[in-house]
Image (tube, helix red, strand yellow):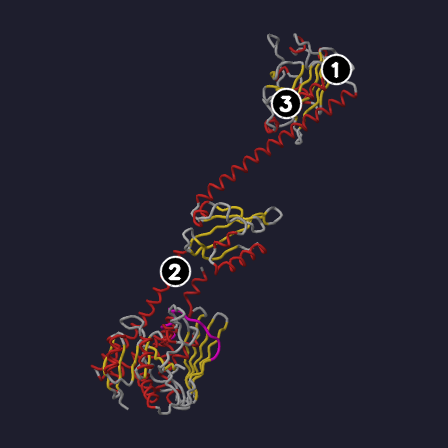
Amino acid sequence: MGIWPRLEFRLTAAALPWNETDRLSALQAYGILDTEPEQAFDDIVHLASRICDAPIAVVNLIDSGRQWFKAETGLGVRETPLDTSFCAHALLQDDGMVVPDATRDSRFECNPLVTGEAGLRFYAGRLLKSPDGFALGTLCVLDTRVRPEGLTPLQTETLDVLARQVMAQLELRRAIREREEGVVALSESEAQFRAIADSMPQMVWSTLPDGFHDYYNARWYEFTGTPPGSTDGEGWNDMFHPDDQARAWATWKHSLETGDLYEIEYRLRRADGVYRWTLGRATPIRNEAGQITRWFGTCTDIEDLKQSEAGKDLLSQELSHRIKNIFAVVSSLIALSAREHPEAKAFAGSVRDRINALARAHEFVRPHSEVSQPLIGDTTLHTFLSALFRPYVDASGQSRVVIEGDDATFDDQAATSVALLFHELATNAAKYGALSVPGGRVLLRTRNEGDRFILTWTERDGPAIAGKPARQGFGSALSTLSVEGQLGGKLERRWEPGGLVLEADLPATALSRRRAALKKK
Amino acid sequence: MTARILIIEDEALVAMELRFVLEDLGHEVIATAADAKTARSIAAENDIDLALVDIHLSDGPTGIDLGRELGQDMGVTVLFMTANPGMVREGVAGTIGVLSKPTDERAVQTAVDYALRRREGRPVEYAPPELQLFG
C-alpha cells in the first residue's frame, strides 16, 4: 500500500491469549488456504454485501504473516499483509468487532487503508471459530461511509448466521476430503495386501463371516490350476480328497460357529491331479463390537514333511529292532563263550539272565509301531514286571509275584535301573527267599504319594529269616546303585521274620525323567 | 524224545548257541538256514520234526509265510523265535506259538518239550510262561 508509515501493530505471539502455533495448525487442517474460489463461499460474501449494504465483503482467513481471502467482493485481491489488517484485531475480540468510524478509532486512524486511497471508514466482522475454539479468521463487511449507527439487528443476525454457514462449509469440505483420502488409503492398503499375499509361498484365502470364500491369492490358483473365481463360495471343498471332504467341512463349520481357530490337515488336489497333504489354518478378524467380520486363512503344503516323518518313524523302528537283535547276539555270545570255560558256567548264566532282563525292559520303552507293539499291551511298569516275573508261577499257572497299586510308565533312562532292580530281587528270592520254596509268595505294591513313587516288595511264606545277612551280595549292591544312583531314590531293606521287605522311595519323575524335563520347558 | 530239528535264523551266533542248547538236550539239529529258500529246500529233502523260525531272515521278513507253509503243508511243528513277537500277534495258522528273543536255555527247553508233546498228541497241562501260544 505504498509509502504510508506502517502501524506498529504486530500480531506477536507474546501478545496473544492463545497458542498461535496450534491455531495455525487448526487452520492448515482445513486445507482451505490457496484453494480456488468456490460458489458456496462466493454466494455468502455476495449476500453479506447486499444485506449489510456494504461494497466490500470478505471470507478472510488469518494465516501467519498474511490474510488470505477464500471469497471476496469489492476488493479485487486475494490476499494482503497482516500488518494493515482490521481482522487481526477482530481476532482479539470474543466473537466479532464493529468499527463505526475508523478515523476516530486509535487502532486504525493511521492505517493506510483508512488514510489512503481505499478510504475505509466502516468495519463489521464476525469470527470464524473452529469447533475446538480456534479463531481461523472472519466474515466481514467494510464500507467507505462512516456508519455511526453500526449494523441493524437483521444485518447483525445475518452476519452471525452467515459466519456460521462459512464454518459449516469448511467442515463439510474437510469431511469429504478426509473420506476421499480414506478411500485412497484403503485402496492402497488393499493393493499392498494383495502384493504381499501373492508373493507368499503359501496359499492364502479369505472369507466373509458366513464362510463364503471370496479371495484366494495367486498361489492357490497356480497350485490347483482352477480358473480365478471358480472356487468362490464353497467350491473349495471339491479340491479336497474325497475322504477328507466331510471332515474338513465339519471342522470349518465348527470354526464358523464358535470363532475357534481353524486348523486341519487334509489332502489337496494339485493341478496335475496329485493329492498333497496340506495344513489349513485360519483366524477370524473382529470389529470393535467383537463380531467376526472376515476369516483369513492359509494352506501350507506339508507332503514333504509328512514323508520325512514317516521315513524317520521307519528308521527309528529299524534301529530299535537292531538294538534288540544286538541283545540277542550278546546273550548268545556269552553263552557260547561260557562253553569254553565250564568253571564259569554259573557266572555266564547270571550275566546272561541280567542281559535278558535289560533286553526285556528295553522292549517296553523303545518306540513302537502298531506292528512291533509288545503282544501284551501297554508299555507300562506293571506289564513289564508281569513279563519279567512270568517264569515264577505256581503249579496251577498263577504268578507267585502279585503286583498291585498305581501303574506308571517308564522311559529309556529308567529302563536299565528298573530291569536290574527287579531282576535282582526276583533272582535272590528264587535262590534264598520266598520264591525258593513252593508255598512262598511276593507282594509287590506300587503307589503314588504326592511327588514320590513308592515300590514295596514283601516276601512271605519263604524260609525263616534269622536277621540281616552278614555280607551284601553283588546283586544287592546293584539294586542299591540302581535306586539311589540312577533313579535318585532311597532304598530300605528290612529282614523281618516273615520275609524280606524292601522299599524303594523314588521321586515321581524318576521313571520318566525325559518327559518331566520336557514339561518343565 | 529225540527230535529232528531245523533252526531258521540269520544271526549266526544266535543259531550256533541254539544248536548247542538243543544238542545238549539230546536232540538232533539237522541244519541251520538263514533264508526262506534254503529252509524250504532242506525241509523238502529231510524229515523234520520241529522248526524254530525267526521272522526276520537274511532275505527279509519272510519267516511268517515260511512258518505257515512248514506247519500247514509240510507236517513240521513250528515255533517262532523273534525279537518282534508283535508281528505275529494275530497268530499264524498251522504253528504252535512264539518265543521272545533273547531267550535262555530253560525257556528253549521247556518250549521245545511242550511243542514235541503236542506233536506226539500227548496231554499237556499248560504252556511254559515264556511261550505265547496261538489260538
Of badges 1 and 2, the one in the foreground is 2
Residue type highlighted by circle 3: Glu
Residue nearer the viewer, A414 or A325: A325
The residues bearing labels 1 and 2 have C-alpha atoms spaced at a distance of 92 Å
Seen in the picture, residue B78 relative to B121 is either above or below; the reply is above
Task: Tell me the crowding category of disc 3: few under 14, some 14 to 19, or many 20 or more residues within 10 angstroms, Cα based.
Answer: few
Q: Which residue is mark 2?
A: A309
Q: Earlier in the sequence, mark 1 or mark 2?
A: 1
Tell me residue A353's x, y (percent).
32, 80
Q: Quick check: B109 above or below A51?
A: below
Q: How far is disc 2 from disc 3 in space, using C-alphas?
A: 72 Å
**Subunit that carries the residue with mark 1:** A
Mark sitting earlier along the chain (2/3): 3
Horizontal side of residue A500 vs A168, given as left or right = left
The residue shown at (59%, 27%) is A31
Q: Nearer the viewer, mark 1 or mark 3?
A: 3
Q: Nearer the viewer, residue A193 or A19?
A: A193
Q: How many marks?
A: 3
Residue B115 versus residue A71: which sits nearer the camera? Answer: B115
Q: Earlier in the sequence, mark 1 or mark 3?
A: 3
Residue occupied by mark 1:
A53
Q: Position of residue A304 (x, y in %)?
A: 38, 56
Pick the front one: A42 or A492? A42
* Span highlighted in magenta in the image: A404-418
Q: Which residue is mark 3?
A: A38
Q: Chain of mark 2?
A: A
Tag 1's secondary structure? loop
Q: Chain of mark 3?
A: A
The Cα–Cα distance between marks 1 and 3, rounded to whole angstroms, is 22 Å
The secondary element bearing badge 3 is classed as loop
Q: Position of residue A148 (x, y in %)?
A: 77, 13
